[in-house]
Amino acid sequence: MNALMLTARLDIAESLRARWFMFYATIFGGIVVLLFVFGLTESRILGFTGLSRLLVTYIQLCVAILPVFILITTVRSVAGDRDAGVFEYMLSLPVPLAAWFWGKMVGRFIVVFMPVFGAMACASLYALVRGIEVDWNLFLLYTTLLVALAWAFLGIGMLISTIARSPDVAQTGAFLTWLILLLFLDLILLGVMVREQMPVEFVVALAVANPLQCFRTAAILLFDPQMVVLGPAAYVILDAVGRTGYLIFAIAYPVALGTLCAGIGYHLFRRGDLP
């Protein structure tokens, strides 16, 4: 455990000094600032006012921005160290492989989630100062969903990083993974499935297996309990598991997916040719 925490601290310190982290933090901080500038905390749209409206917009933006940032930065974790010759140095130290691998994952999770949560926390503090009502239950649910989303793509990124043999290949694989998941959010997947006359339950199950779609649907469910924008697919989801059941699934499934991918990555990392 000590070796794991030391590895996590080292990865955090290294990431905080990197230029990509400053750019990454500026992106999410800038999004919140722009939302304040445009007055979303004081607007009323579809019955949502104050911070709730800002969080709805912020979460929708995170769907497209957060996964690609996590993938691109994480895939260089193992592949970059392999290319830089860090493994040879690491093997000369009394650091277990498990502590190094999971320590890097824990440290990277803290680094990638800190700016996202910090932007939401600053928005909440600003709302309190302005006397705007803060729905803390909604804030907690959004935070939990973001934790699940970040962990899922962090695990996928660690798996890609372990498989790839160079940073360039790893980054290409990460971008293609994000692009495929993004393309299969709605139109392509549903169009193909409907054209092939597949059962609607199978189509919806395959759709929510995409962690992006799973997160997006849960975010919609929080501010639209009937999920009107999803059309008939909403009835399939609500009739099958209900609102509470789907929110539990939207949190548990990405966490399980990220852990599974990271576990496979560690297995390949431990059995592979490290140098």
Image (cartoon, rainbow, N blue to C red):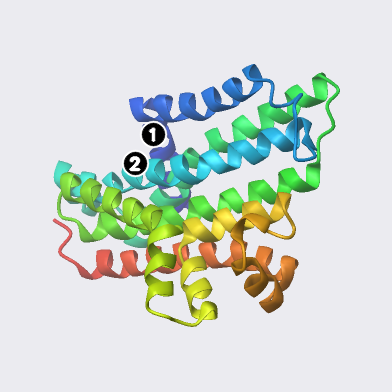
Q: Position of residue 222 (x, y in %)?
A: 71, 53
Q: Which mark is residue 85?
A: none
Chain-order first, disc 1 or disc 2: 1
**Quadrant the C terminus occupies:** bottom left
Q: Residues within 10 Å of mark 1 (few under 14, many from 20)?
A: some
Q: Position of residue 221 (x, y in %)?
A: 68, 56
Up-down: is 159 above or below 86? below
Give the residue drawn at x 27%, y 45%. 76
Determine the image quadrant of residue 85. top left
Up-down: is 246 above or below 8? below
Q: Position of residue 191 (x, y in %)?
A: 40, 66
Which label sits in the foreground, 1 or 2? 2
Question: What amino acid type is highlighted by mark number 1?
Answer: Ser
Determine the image quadrant of residue 29. top right
Asked if residue 83 lies left or right of residue 61, the reply is left
Label 2, on which residue? 73
Give the residue drawn at x 47%, y 38%. 111
Q: Which mark is residue 15?
A: 1
- Find out whether the residues at labels 1 and 2 contact each other: C-beta distance under 8 Å: yes
Q: Position of residue 201 (x, y in %)?
A: 54, 79
